[in-house]
Image (cartoon, rainbow, N blue to C red):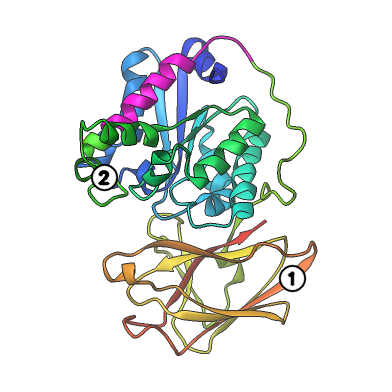
Amino acid sequence: MQKPLHHTFNSLKERKRLTLGYFGGSITEGSGASDPSKRSWRALTTSWFSNNHPDCEITEIQAAIGGTGSDLGAYRCRTDLLKGKPDLVFVEFAVNDHKKDEELILRSMEGIVRQIWDFDKNIDIVFVYTITEAMAESYALDRAPRTVQLHQKMADFYEIPSVNVGKKLWQSVGAGMLTWEELLPDSVHPSDKGYQIYADEMQRFLSDSIAPGQIERKLGNYLTSRVNDKGRLVDAWELFREPWAKDNNSLAGRYPHMLVCGNPGAELEYKFKGGSIGLYWLIAPDSGDIAWSLDGNKTGIISSWDKHALNFTRAGYCILDSNLQAGEHVLKIKVLQEKHPQSEGNWIRIGAFLID
């Protein structure tokens, strides 16, 4: 039996105001829908609340970013989601977490949960499990996909309700009602028909789960040993120095500005305290590569360009190290002359540093 959404009910009936937070990837954004603002499961869910509660003010926080998992989510939770003061949060990262390390997934998902309830213990949370065609093999073998199992482990530990809209879509295909081509044309992102199945299952869940009453949540022990519950974005402008420049253009609409440099050999040093470090940067046709080092020993080379940059510019991220010891650390990065042959330049554009 699902845990009831008490705070959601009270917001609808007593406060007459409900703010919905959507936290996930491109499927929550609505990629593949003919009109994401109207035909995605997110939009249809918001519309369901508005239609069923016409006397209540319903607002929406769209905090989903395509191609990102719970690992980035744990760093941007406060900035992108909680600043909007949601009453009910839908968390959908199972698809984009599918290639990530098990420990990282659990630490990130727990970090998201703890950040939300540290902010306000009255916020209701729902885990949402979508699907790709590749994930369907697990259901055919009568088991949930690996990431769904890991997310559900966290849901069980914190008594968070979950809704598996992906399994419902898989059942529609298995029953011979519709085909994968009709529901997931690119094998990942639903068509309008696919999103309607997601939305119908979500609405069924909500109808059964919104209930009166109160619940007192107490945050006790952690499930993981190194939970990312202090994740945050540190503005890259704080490190401004020439030849780096402050760029007022946004990070593909995901962060208000960037620190940029396209000069091979240019360096940047960042002294910080934390257990992890990463970059929140732009992936563009002219993006370049960097060499990086941590504390003078851990080193690597990473590119802010990938093959998808040939078709569109977007916000991206890389976590350089998530297992640092407590204390002070020094990150150094250097813009390289070498780059991918298809890249049009050497530009590095950083919106923020990922720190926990």
Residue type, mark 2 in image: Leu
In the rendered structure, the answer to whether residue 1 lies left or right of residue 42 reads: right
The x, y position of residue 69, in whole percent, is: 49, 52
Instruction: Indicate yes or no whether the magenta region holds residue 202.
Output: yes
Q: Residue 71 colored magenta? A: no
Q: Is residue 285 left or right of residue 77?
A: left
Q: Report the front residue among 72 and 153.
A: 153
Q: Is residue 284 left or right of residue 125?
A: left
Q: Amino acid at mark 1?
A: His
Q: Is residue 193 above or below residue 279?
A: above
SS majority, magenta: helix
The quarter holding residue 220 reads top right
Residue 308, x across and y down, in percent: 32, 67
Is residue 187 positioned above or below 237 on the image?
A: above
Where 243 sits versus 11, above or below? Answer: below
Q: Residue at x 34, y 80 (%)?
A: 343
- In which quadrant of the rendered image does the C terminus lie? bottom right
Q: Which mark is residue 329?
A: 1
Q: Secondary structure at mark 1?
A: strand
How far, Cα to Cα, is label 2 from label 1?
A: 45 Å
Q: Residues within 10 Å of mark 2 (few under 14, many from 20)?
A: many
Q: Cβ–Cβ below 8 Å for labels 2 and 1?
A: no
State the residue position of label 2: 184
Q: Which mark is residue 126?
A: none
Q: Residue at x 53, y 57 (%)?
A: 100
Q: Which residues are magenta?
A: 196-214
